[in-house]
Image (spheres, rainbow, N blue to C red):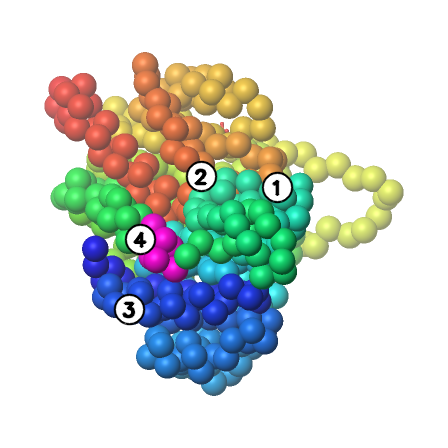
């Protein structure tokens, strides 16, 4: 099997680090380009020079190194990778991954990575069996990290049990197989269609300096816009205030308030084939925006809120309506509430996710979606928002191409 991919190898501080030198050699032999990132403690076990010689690339270890950031910063490094494999992954490193800590280059790269991530744990058998380690492993598995090994046998410390890192040959064939299994990118399936997407939060002003908003990052809507573009669509993105760069080749209409989003969407929706309402539109906005800064006075104060217009429901009620997809963030009874929203707002599809739980959702890199339509549905497992968006766009493309939804029928 050949591996013509960019592989980022993370090495953390365990005695098994010496085996990773062989892993670099094997990966390169199969055609991979390899870059190595070492933690400080890994460098106590094996010299960066070994990895530099074997990979043919400089080794990365510093998060806050101006020279390294100039050459290839941590974000470019994360984007460069087609796959991140951490071998050996120590108990400490796994704990950091499971909690999203980013206090060194390797843990930061994990957070920044959008590619598939693999870890090959290596540690003493008692450390591996410790409940907290098992919980951490379970948690990163739920975050779509694939765990290779560990194996059973004699350990460097003299004990016997599970905790030995898998052999480099085993890791290498596991990765080669996984890369082969990866489904190829979805073929363009929205070719020539106009897609309108709303994303991000809205800001509802109370006075010239204050507003009510929510934690939406806009990541899901932006990922959907890019996935629709890659599927061949002409995309317009109506965006609330977010900290994301405007995607290339997509028309971005920036708005702040729910009322502005309403106007921007309603004026465009009739000539679009698909509308995806991924924005977290405020349900209420202050009834009056005070023209001057509100003064601090009484112990308690009251703000009167007025319901905003439901953009999604209005789009779905248009005579010339696009295929309309809504989102639903629920804390309980997910399917019942989502299906109720689907019917009540007369949507074609609704993508629901849990909020207020440990994982995913608002302001997170990852999410899982439960997608419903009349008489059907599908679950999209927890993964990063880029992949999730591709899967949702494929589902939408599949549904608009069913005879029932074909234009003119
Ligand atoms: O009813 P709920 O707010 O939970 O529905 C969420 C869906 O409705 C999302 O797709 C959101 O973009 C959309 N929505 C809207 N206009 C509003 C409130 C929500 O388009 N004012």
**Can residue 384 be seen here?**
yes
What residue do we see at 53% from left, 81% from top?
A: 65
* CA–CA distance in space, label 1 to label 4: 27 Å
* CA–CA distance in space, label 4 to label 2: 25 Å
Q: Which residues are magenta?
A: 168-174
Mark closest to the chain's N terminus, 1 or 3 = 3
Observer-nearest residue: 22 or 147? 22
Name the residue that disc number 3 marks.
28
Mark closest to the chain's N terminus, 1 or 4 = 1
- Neighbor class of circle 3 (other Cα within 10 Å; few <14, some 14-19, many 20+) is many
Name the residue that disc number 2 marks.
382
Residue 82 against residue 407 in the figure, above or below: below
Mark closest to the chain's N terminus, 3 or 4 = 3
**Can residue 246 be seen here?**
no
What residue do we see at 51% from left, 75% from top?
A: 46
- Neighbor class of circle 4 (other Cα within 10 Å; few <14, some 14-19, many 20+) is some
Q: Secondary structure at mark 4?
A: helix
| Residue 135: mark | 1
State the image coordinates of residue 361 (x, y, percent, origin top left).
51, 40
* CA–CA distance in space, label 2 to label 1: 17 Å
User: Which quadrant, please, contains the N terminus?
Assistant: bottom left
Report whether 384 appears left or right of 304: left
Residue 190 sits in which quadrant?
Answer: top left
* CA–CA distance in space, label 2 to label 3: 31 Å
Mark closest to the chain's N terminus, 4 or 2 = 4
């Amino acid at each position: 099997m050949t591996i013509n991919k960019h592989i980022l190898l993370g090495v953390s501080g365990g005695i098994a680090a010496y085996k990773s030198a062989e892993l670099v050699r094997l990966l390169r032999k199969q055609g991979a380009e390899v870059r190595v990132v070492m933690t400080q403690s890994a460098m106590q076990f094996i010299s960066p020079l070994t990895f530099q010689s074997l990979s043919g690339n400089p080794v990365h270890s510093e998060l806050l190194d101006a020279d390294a950031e100039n050459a290839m910063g941590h974000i470019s490094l994360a984007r460069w990778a087609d796959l991140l494999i951490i071998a050996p992954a120590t108990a400490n490193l796994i704990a950091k991954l499971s909690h999203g800590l980013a206090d060194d280059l390797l843990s930061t790269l994990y957070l920044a990575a959008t590619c598939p991530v693999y870890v090959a744990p290596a540690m003493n058998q008692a450390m591996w069996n410790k409940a907290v380690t098992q919980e951490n492993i379970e948690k990163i598995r739920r975050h779509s990290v694939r765990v290779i090994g560990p194996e059973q046998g004699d350990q460097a410390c003299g004990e016997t049990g599970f905790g030995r890192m898998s052999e480099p040959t085993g890791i290498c064939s596991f990765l080669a197989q996984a890369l082969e299994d990866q489904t190829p990118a979805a073929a363009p399936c929205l070719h020539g269609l106009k897609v309108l997407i709303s994303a991000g939060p809205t800001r509802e002003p109370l006075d010239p300096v204050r507003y009510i908003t929510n934690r939406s990052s806009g990541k899901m809507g932006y990922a959907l816009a890019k996935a629709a573009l890659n599927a061949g669509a002409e995309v317009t993105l109506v965006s609330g205030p977010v900290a994301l760069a405007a995607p290339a080749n997509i028309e971005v209409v920036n708005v702040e308030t729910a009322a502005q989003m309403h106007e921007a969407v309603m004026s465009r929706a009739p000539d679009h084939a698909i509308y995806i309402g991924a924005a977290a539109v405020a349900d209420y906005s202050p009834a009056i925006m005070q023209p001057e800064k509100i003064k601090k006075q009484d112990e308690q104060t009251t703000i009167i809120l007025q319901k905003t217009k439901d953009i999604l429901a209005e789009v779905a009620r248009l005579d010339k309506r696009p295929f309309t997809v809504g989102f639903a963030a629920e804390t309980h009874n997910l399917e019942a509430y989502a299906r109720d929203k689907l019917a009540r707002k007369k949507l074609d599809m609704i993508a629901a996710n849990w909020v207020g739980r440990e994982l995913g959702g608002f302001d997170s890199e990852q999410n899982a979606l439960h997608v419903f339509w009349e008489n059907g549905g599908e679950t999209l497992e927890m993964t990063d928002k880029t992949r999730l968006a591709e899967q949702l766009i494929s589902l939408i493309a599949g549904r608009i191409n069913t005879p029932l939804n074909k234009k003119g029928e």
